[in-house]
Image (tube, grey):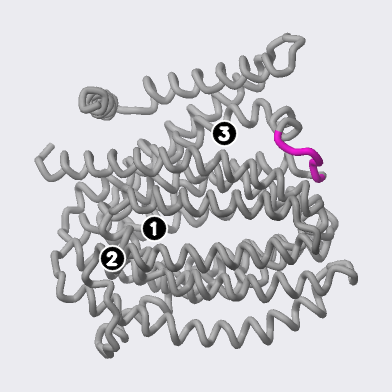
Amino acid sequence: MNTISVNNNKRIAKNTLLLYMRMMLMMALSLYTSRINLDSLGEINYGIYNVVGGVVAMFSIISGSISVAISRFLTIELGKGNKEKLNTVFCTSINIQILIGVLIFIIAESVGVWFLNTHMNIPTERMEAANWVLQCSIITFLINLISVPYNALIIAHEKMSAFAYISLIEAIFKLIVCFLLYISPVDKLIVWAVMLMVVAICMRMIYGIYAKRHFEESTYHFKVDKSLMNEMSRFIGWAFFGNGVCVLRDQGTNILLNLFFGPAVNAARGIAMSVNTAMYSFVTNFMTAINPQITKSYAQSDFESMNTLIMRGCRFGFFILMLLVIPVCANIDYILNLWLIEIPKHTASFVMLILFYSMVDSYCSPLLTGVLANGHIKYYEIQLTIIYIINFIFIYVILKLGFAPEWVFILAIVFKIFVIISLVWNGHGMFRLNIRLFFRKAVVRPILIFIICLLITQWIKFDINNDLIKFLVSAIFSFILSFVSIWFIGLEARERETIVKIIINKIRNH
């Protein structure tokens, strides 16, 4: 292993550690605030916020495309060492953001308001509060849209300590919001929407100040680089389809659940998504640390290192989730009763299915980063569009036929597998990804390990009268079983040696 690869691995390990330290506290705060918010708002209000927020999220099609484009172009220029073009890319992205922000505002205020007031399944007495939520969500969305170039710079420069500290500040703000909501004497749904908007404004200012102080290329000047604008526009245009169908499938599904089952099911989905977001942040942090290295390896035409990082990222992401998912699945009912005061119907099944979906989805991030690094995403985005449109049609049909809402998530898992197959196929053509080696090392072995461990934990039951002790014993057993299986069967000898060395060095340095 050459010196560059060793330094890259150390950087990934350091950044991942920083992100995990921040994430552990954020996860605890997130789960706690979800519990308090559900108790404060009630099942119906909580469901309304989730589904109305979904209406606004449907307009994130374009912003998601821009976010992908900006991160990709900035990271490519950093990988090439082209500092002069960095500012041009940044300024061009700001220009695009302004134009898109105006467009989204017009669409959201017309289509969004019309759809909310004429088609959504919301109690009449809560319609005024729902409109407050919509307006605050639109403003919050626009604020987050403006923050995209600054956040992309932080990721491209791999300054993960900034994310660690700033995200911690955001979590504390939301904790404060949670307690203010609890004691608020006025309409709690409106108060919640307004305060989350205020938090978004504060975070936008903090990210902007940090970027301007640490990255000289973050200074905005009005520039019009037609060549770069055209190149980014083509990339954004094709990424639009992928992001569009993702939003259609995810947020459109949330709206369908509202239309067929009402806001109570949206509340169950919202709780399940809170659990999933907290747990998936483990994978997100790891991917945030590894993805810039994948893009920079492509910029340097180092396809061997790139493919190694992609396969390792897929396996490690899957294993990280496995360590958490198996103990949760073994004790889902106890965890929900311990966590929530009132548990909406379908919550337990939603949580388990969404976690299974996330384990499949963990393969996408490294593969997608490789495909986006290539830049020629036309055929992949067409494939993704077809897969998700068919997925959405299937969801509508099964709900129309009277199937249970759980089938929405089962179909999502099935079609996500088709997305992974598409990514692997495109990776083979773009950066010489070995398909047979990928499935053998990154798919077959990890999934077999997961299935065996899951079956063992479901089969073995501990006959202990005290529920808390029974939960602790079951959770510890599940975690140890998963960890030992991953360590001795899932990891390669070189990977075990590298992890041990990193841990020893960290201990010695402290």
User: In this orientation, which residue lies closer to the viewer: 130 or 197?
Assistant: 197
Above or below 286: residue 474: above
Which residue sits at x=71%, y=51%? 269
CB-based contact (under 8 Å), mark 2 and mark 1: no
Q: Nearer the viewer, residue 172 or 381?
A: 172
The crowd level at tag 2 (other Cα within 10 Å; few <14, some 14-19, many 20+) is some
In the rendered image of this protein, does residue 296 appear above or below residue 149?
A: above
Q: Quadrant of the N terminus?
A: top left
Indicate which disc, 2 or 1, sits on the residue closer to the N terminus. Answer: 1
Give the residue pinned by disc 2: 374
As measured in the structure, the alpha-carbon distance from the residue carrying label 2 to the one carrying label 3 is 33 Å
Image disc number at residue 368? 1
Select label 1 or label 3 by which is in front.
3
Q: What's the residue at 77%, 10% (across, down)?
A: 465
> Where does label 3 land, which residue?
325
Q: Is residue 105 left or right of residue 149?
A: right
Q: What SS does tag 1 mark?
A: helix
Residue extent of the magenta highlight: 339-344
The alpha-carbon separation of the residues under discs 2 and 1 comes to: 10 Å
| Circle 2 SS class | helix
- Kind of residue at disc 3: Val
Q: Position of residue 377 (x, y in %)?
A: 37, 70
Quadrant containing the C terminus is: top left
Q: Residue furthest right?
A: 124
